[in-house]
Image: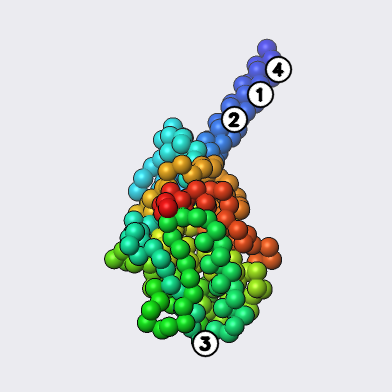
């Protein structure tokens, strides 16, 4: 009897330990899924924490349940193409571009090639080079100082119905290949007419997770462009000209189908 009792107690003890282990594992799985769901929904990892009671908290004061985290992830999509709330007015869409004399003839040739790509879309926008300072709509100029760590160029967005008035070119871009310079100019011209990064709300193409703005402020989805799963490790459209980051060895130098659709939707002929 005593031996049997001891054995049974041992079995009970083993069962209790196993139950505790199962419970801990279940709690760990639940916590992991909640965090995964919130990351897919776009929350920065630094905003998520696990408190002393094992609850996942957001920004310190929001406790997130498993169901709530699943519902936040539910749409499973990020739209691919966005534009700013400011556009170039119809009467200002014949855009003259001045390449400042501080940039050499080779770089000017890259800008000219970029304008050919833009004009090939057949949108309501048209671009041409000008040599007359004061007549330009967009001024491309070279900065002798770095613009910011890792920043190649810096564009202004549309304002008052006009395209962004300038694109500053940093020394880092001038050290890149002609192909990458052409890609960057196509990209930056897009910003001057209001196109945003495809992955503005995650910068997934830069291998990081951050939002360029609060929520979707200043960015509107372009109706008809594609959607992609938010957990994509690459940009939703790897062929897009408007990803936040691109390969420096083989960047795209023609618009993707979604790029073309976006441009034609915002600026129809």
Q: Which mark is residue 102?
A: 3
Work out which quarter of the rendered image holds the N terminus and state it: top right
- Mark 4 burial class by Cα count in 10 Å: few <14, some 14-19, many 20+: few
- Mark 3 burial class by Cα count in 10 Å: few <14, some 14-19, many 20+: few
Residue assigned mark 4: 3
Tell me whether circle 1 and circle 3 mark residues in contact (CB < 8 Å): no
Marks 4 and 3 sit apart, C-alpha to C-alpha, by 94 Å
Report the residue that reaches farthest toward the left. Answer: 160
Q: First in sequence, mark 2 or 4: give its number.
A: 4
Give the number of the mark in front: 2 or 1. Answer: 2
Q: Which mark is residue 22?
A: 2
Give the number of the mark in front: 4 or 1. Answer: 1
Task: Report the residue at 56% width, 78% height from top.
Answer: 108
| Disc 4, SS | helix
Marks 4 and 1 sit apart, C-alpha to C-alpha, by 10 Å
Which residue is at the front of the view, 135 or 266? 135
Name the quadrant containing residue 16: top right
Tell me whether circle 2 and circle 4 mark residues in contact (CB < 8 Å): no
Give the number of the mark in front: 4 or 3. Answer: 3
At which x and y percent is residue 23? Answer: 55, 31
Marks 2 and 4 sit apart, C-alpha to C-alpha, by 28 Å
- Mark 2 burial class by Cα count in 10 Å: few <14, some 14-19, many 20+: few
| Disc 3, SS | loop
Which residue is at the front of the view, 64 or 222? 222
Q: First in sequence, mark 4 or 3: give its number.
A: 4
Instruction: Tell me if I can see residue 172 in this picture.
Output: no
Residue assigned mark 1: 10
At which x and y percent is residue 173? Answer: 58, 76
């Amino acid at each position: 009897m005593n031996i049997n009792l001891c054995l049974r107690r041992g079995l009970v003890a083993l069962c209790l330990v196993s139950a505790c282990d199962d419970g801990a594992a279940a709690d760990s799985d639940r916590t992991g899924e909640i965090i995964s769901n919130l990351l897919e929904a776009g929350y920065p990892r630094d905003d998520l924490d696990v408190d002393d009671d094992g609850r996942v908290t957001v920004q310190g004061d929001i406790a997130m349940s498993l169901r709530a985290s699943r519902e936040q992830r539910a749409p499973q999509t990020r739209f691919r193409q966005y534009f700013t709330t400011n556009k170039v007015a119809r009467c200002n869409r014949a855009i003259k571009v001045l390449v400042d004399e501080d940039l050499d003839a080779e770089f000017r040739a890259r800008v000219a090639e970029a304008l050919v790509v833009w004009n090939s879309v057949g949108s309501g926008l048209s671009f041409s080079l000008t040599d007359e300072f004061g007549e330009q709509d967009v001024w491309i100029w070279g900065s002798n100082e770095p613009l910011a760590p890792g920043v190649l160029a810096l564009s202004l967005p549309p304002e008052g119905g006009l395209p962004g008035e300038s694109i500053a070119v940093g020394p880092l871009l001038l050290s890149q290949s002609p192909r990458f310079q052409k890609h960057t100019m196509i990209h930056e011209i897009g910003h001057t007419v209001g196109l945003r990064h495809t992955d503005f709300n995650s910068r997934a193409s830069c291998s990081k997770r951050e939002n360029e703005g609060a929520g979707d402020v200043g960015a509107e989805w372009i109706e008809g462009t594609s959607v992609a799963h938010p957990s994509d490790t690459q940009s939703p459209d790897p062929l897009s000209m408007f990803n936040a980051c691109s390969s420096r060895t083989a960047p795209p130098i023609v618009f993707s189908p979604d790029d073309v659709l976006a441009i034609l939707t915002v600026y129809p002929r």
